[in-house]
Image: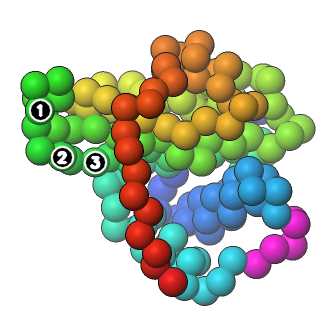
Amino acid sequence: MIEIRKAKPNDMEQVLNMRYATIKSVCHLHKEYVFDKKFQNHTRSYYENADQTTVLAWNDNVPIGCATICYILLMPTFDHPTGKRAHIMNVYVDKKYRRQGIALKMMEMLMDEAKEKGVSEISLDATEEGRFLYEQLGFKASTEAMVLELPQY
């Protein structure tokens, strides 16, 4: 039976493994690819310390899906008077379990929590495969932002 619930601190290894599986899938990396220690340490620190919620989908105590919402507090604007915004990341379901409503349920859980927290805008980056789901949930494509990427390494 599929269970979907918020991750708990003792789920850290499963959360990390699901994040790595997500990245490997989206970036078409080999299944045996190993992320460098610096990346692994930053990722673990983020999950331990950031304002975020991760949900995991389980089948018989084996994680089969995940999704994370990251909360961001910005200066209030007229359109977003609370300044509370969020970004959803790493929506992923193992291939064997796709098209069963698991991603939809995880998204609804995160969106409900965001509403309870007074979030006025949720953003996400969509793959072509996930776009239909997000459109069903009311997300719309946007070209509002400009981005400057600063080199880190």
Three-letter amino acid code of the residue under disc 3? Ile
Element at badge 2? Answer: loop
Prevailing secondary structure of the magenta residues: loop
- Mark sitting on residue 77: 1
Q: Quadrant of the N terminus?
A: top right
Element at badge 3? Answer: strand
User: Of the residues tagged 3 and 1, which is closer to the observer?
Assistant: 1
Precedes in sequence: disc 3 or disc 1: 3
Identify the residue at horizontal 58%, vertical 23% (top origin).
134
Q: CA distance from mark 3 to mark 1?
A: 14 Å
Bounds of the magenta segment: 30-34
Residue 48 % position (x, y): 40, 68
Note whether residue 110 is visible. Answer: yes
Residue 10 % position (x, y): 52, 65
Residue 3 part of the magenta segment: no
Residue 118 % position (x, y): 21, 29
The answer to whether mark 2 and mark 1 are in CB contact below 8 A is: yes
The answer to whether mark 3 and mark 2 are in CB contact below 8 A is: yes
Decide if residue 143 is on the left or right side of residue 19.
left
| Disc 3 target residue | 72
Identify the residue at horizontal 87%, vertical 66% (top origin).
30
92, 149: nearer the viewer: 149
Residue 32 part of the magenta segment: yes
Residue 117 % position (x, y): 24, 33
